[in-house]
Amino acid sequence: MALGLMSGTSLDAIDAALIETDGEDHVRALAFVERPYSDAERAELAAATAEALTLAAPEPTPRIAAAAALSTRLHVAAVRDLLTSAGVAADAVRVVGYHGQTVAHRPDRGWTWQIGDGAALARATGIACVSDFRSADVAAGGQGAPLLPVYHRALVRSLGTREPVVVLNLGGVANVTFVGGDGTLVAFDTGPANGLVDDWAAQHTGARFDAKGALAAGGQVHPDVLDAMMDHPFFDAPGPKSLDRADFTIQPARGLSAADGAATLTAFTAHTVAAGLALLPERPSRLIVAGGGRRNPTMLRMIAEATGLAPEPADALGWNGDATEAEGFAYMAVRTLRGLPISFPGTTGVTGAMAGGVSHPAA
């Protein structure tokens, strides 16, 4: 068994998943828990992220160091919650895949930064840990993201399909994984997903997100604003490519009503997904959606209109759309222990398939 942990840039919760896997084709989901952040915890992590984005290189300032310690403690608690919920002893788990909390992602500058102490987590839980999954890839000239494609391929293979399939993850940032009929992997970030809509909802309604897309559903898309936002070189650039959540802002929608701004920003996500699909080697037969955005029917409707494909929520296939990323880091931790690659030329832009992650033995 392997345990995976993921905390996204939306700072809604820590996801913890337990799976059975060989790091190749065998994957079986066993258990999942979600540990929501309190407002105070979210504010501390958000402040550290804001500070990290002002730095020219990773530097553990007092604020960021304190947030890193907080993140580690909370992830240790999430591990214990999952083991208790699943009725599994720590010594039955081979490894924890600990992604950490991304505070800045700057592959164009040669670095990416996920705070959290893998060695401390291994000591506290008594389970071997693999952390820092992205740094080796960036150091080798890759984008350091997305890393889930190799796990997406394992999930797609379980469907038994031989047609090209795309897995779309709608988190703070959206990314696609193209799995060809022969197993070919192509992946990249397509643009903002929930991030901008969340920011807009927080500023205009006080809510942390646009629940079920209700705010956007009541608004009108402003084509002039949408066209201006789409006029960015990122969208025409070929993959692999990746983004930081802060690379785009809600500024172009300023002056719109709350509903119209939400509608326009949601349409922006949909159009960037469509632009991304146009860069793939062939048109996919299916579009499977994971991440929080799959719960937003307005976003899914706009994606369907923009792409001509009917989005299929991952849960309809028997997957857990909330657990996918946490499961993926459990899967990649096992691959790291086995010396198998986690990033590839078609997914992050490295020159050859390469392993990643830093291993920490159990206490």
Image (cartoon, helix red, strand yellow):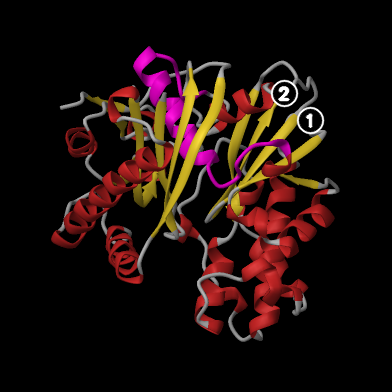
Element class at badge 1: loop
Q: Residues within 10 Å of mark 1 (few under 14, many from 20)?
A: few
| Total numbered circles | 2
Tell whether 318 sits left or right of 68: right
39 vs 251, nearest the viewer: 39
Instruction: Give the x, y percent position of residue 116.
Output: 25, 45
Indicate which disc, 2 or 1, sits on the residue closer to the N terminus: 2
111 vs 15, nearest the viewer: 15
Image point (27%, 44%), residue name = 76
Give the extent of the magenta segment: 317-344
Extreme front residue here? 87
Instruction: Give the x, y percent position of residue 148.
Output: 52, 34
Image point (42%, 23%), residue name = 1
The amino acid beneath tag 1 is: Glu
Image point (74%, 64%), residue name = 298
Question: Is the C terminus in the top left, top right, bottom left or bottom right quadrant?
Answer: top left
Q: Which residue is mark 1?
A: 282
Tell whether 109 sits left or right of 123: right
Residue 280 seen by the camera: no
Instruction: Give the x, y percent position of residue 348.
Output: 50, 32
Q: Residue 182's image quarter?
A: top right
Q: Is residue 337 magenta-colored?
A: yes
Q: Which residue is mark 2?
A: 180
Tell whether 38 sits left or right of 65: right
Image point (74%, 61%), residue name = 297
142 vs 119, nearest the viewer: 119
